[in-house]
Structure formats: structure tokens, C-alpha cells
Amino acid sequence: MKKVSVVTLMMLMMFSTTYAAGSIKPGISNLKNEINKVKLENVQALNKVPAGCSVTMKGKLDLGPIEAEVSCTTTAATCNEATIQAVGCLRAAMNTLRTIIY
Amino acid sequence: MRTVLIVLLSFFVIHLQAQEIKGTWYYQGKFNGSFGRSENYREYWGRLIVHGDRSLFTMKEEGQHHAALQDNTIDLRGDSLFTVYKDHSSNSLLFEFSDLNQKTHYFADTLFPMEWNTTEEHKMIGGIPCLKAETRFKGRGYTAWYAPTITISDGPWKLGGLPGLILEAYDDENNWHMTLLGNSEAYDFDIAFFESKITKGIEGFPAFVGFVKKLFSRLESSFGSNSDCIGCQTKSVLKFHSWEKID
């Protein structure tokens, strides 16, 4: 009976030491982190641009010592696609500037 | 007899000092319209017309305005750039600014506020001995080579205040560079036009800063509300750059 009590006491002590040291709690927390990571990766995968190419095109309004610079940066799957988009964007921007000025 | 000679000599010296320096000094150089962000150099002729205490500096592009031929550039540069009128006697400086409608505006600025670090370094420009001086002015570093033998305390654009005419000047990044080519005795320019501006009263550099900022914000707001790119996935970004620091 005495032995049983000692073993039970030891087990109880081990349990409380482990719990107090936090080795169970971080385990749950790690699991939660893993779940969040997977969720984040899924969200990223949904928004991801496949193997992209970034193109920047610039135009300007030249007043001599003062300049207004217009830039369009586009990212697309291919450089060709990105360039087409950037050209379209810049053309529209320059037209807007012309409309404002003239 | 001796006294008469001294008096005559004194008159001669006074007459020499009172004699106005007149003439035009011609410069050649370049200006990078993108101020170092990319290479957009154009060749310019500079002209400093001196009439006694007053002077006028202008810069005109050599040949064709190339920017006008490019699709992605709207060229609204005035006929002349970096135009500055200085009047040493009234301690005034006026400079020109051409707006979006190519309307010319004039603003005042401080005459030679820059503090020059003069050195013993020397070189010859067109056979004239010159000394080197450096300064910082409105956000940029400038180097000037001035000729102590030409007693005109002036130079291209807003630069000056050295004990001699500036024959060569450039900024630290070499975006703007002017070098003397030669001079002539011609000195005609419309002094009355600039003097009338000074007499009427003219706003200073802070007013110019306000004017440019207002122009930019107007452009920015019109730009933001005027997107005519249907189907564009990217929004364009508008940025402003100024040769002289204006913030």
C-alpha cells in the first residue's frame, strides 16, 4: 500500500512537473501554428502569380527643371504579357495627362 | 605740379572703377532633364549678358527639341531654361518658370546666398587662368571655376558671388554643365522689363515652392480621378521631381 502511494505520488509529481514546464501546452500551440501555416499556404497558392515577369514603363511631363514622372509596373506570367499590360497602362496614363493639360 | 598729377591720377582711377563692364559671355553645355534618374542629356547654349550691375542668363537647346518626338514624353519646356536676371545694385535676383500652359512666371530669390569653399586648385579655360570653388545650393553640390582676372562677380544661372566671373560650372552628378566658349561686346537686353517686375514687387522662392506644389497637387488629383484605362490591371503612379530642392 505504501509502495502504491509512493508510485502514485511520483506519477503525480511527474505530471505536474511536465505540465508546469509547459511541454504539453507548446505541443498544442505548435499544432495550431502548423494548421495556420497550411491555411496561409493555401491562401497564398490561390493568389499566387505563376512564375511572373515584372515590367516597368515610364513616361514624363517635361517642364525643364521640373518633371512629372508617370510609371506603370505590371507583373504577368510572361514578359510579353507584362509588357502589353504596361504599354496599355502607360498609354492611358499619358492620354490622361494630355487631356488634363490641353 | 605734383599735386595736379595726383589729382589727375585719382580722377583716372575713379573713372576706371565707375566704368561699367558690358558684354556677353557665351557658354556651351548640357543638361540631363531626368536629373540623374536616367540619361536624358541635351546640349544647350548658355548666354550671360552683363550690363554693369545687371545681368541676364539664359540657356537654349541646340538644334531640335528631341523630347517632342518621343511618345512617352510631353515636352512643355519653355524656349529657354534657367533664365535668371540679377541686379547687384538692388541685391535682387529674378528667375523664370514656365507652367503647364507655357505661361511664364517670375519669382525672386536671394542673390548669391551660397557659401563657397575656395581652393588653390587652378586650370586654364580658353587661355584664362581659373581657380576652383565648391558649394552646396538648394540640395545639390556645385563646382565653379572662376577667373579672378575678369572682375565680374557673376556666373551661369543663379551661381555667382565669387571674386571673378565663373567660366565653368557643374553639379556633383554632372547633370548640368556649362563651359565658357567666348565673349562679345554686345550687351543688349530688356532691363526695363525686369526692373518693372522688381518695382511692382515680386514673390520670393517660398511662393515659387507653393506654386509648384499647387500645380502638382492639381495634376495629381485630376490624374487620380481621370483613369481612362479600361481593363488595366495596374494603376499608374505619378511622381514629381525638381532640380532645386523644393520641400
Image (cartoon, coloured by chain):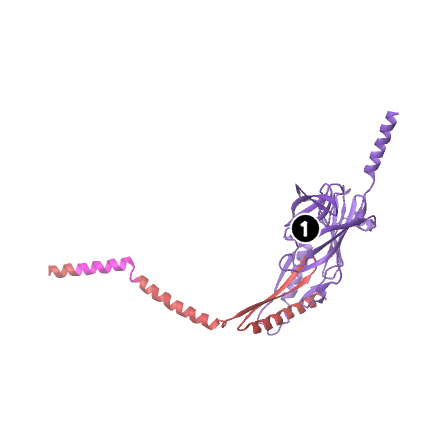
Chain colours: A red, B purple
Q: How many marks?
A: 1
Q: Quadrant of residue B42?
A: bottom right
- Which quadrant, please, contains the N terminus of chain A? bottom left
Image coordinates for residue B9, horizontal then vertical, percent: 84, 31
Closest to the observer: B120 or B34?
A: B120
> Is residue A74 rendered magenta in the image?
no
Closest to the observer: B235 or B27?
A: B27
Res A46 visible: yes
Q: Is residue A65 left or right of residue B54?
A: left
Which residues fall within the magenta stretch?
A8-24
| SS of the residue under disc 1 | strand
Image coordinates for residue B193, horizontal then vertical, percent: 81, 51
Q: What secondary structure predominates along the stretch shown in magenta?
A: helix
User: Which residue is identified by label 1?
Assistant: B170
Residue type beneath disc 1: Tyr
- Which quadrant, please, contains the C terminus of chain A? bottom right
Closest to the observer: A2 or B188?
A: B188
Parent chain of label 1: B
Res B25 visible: no
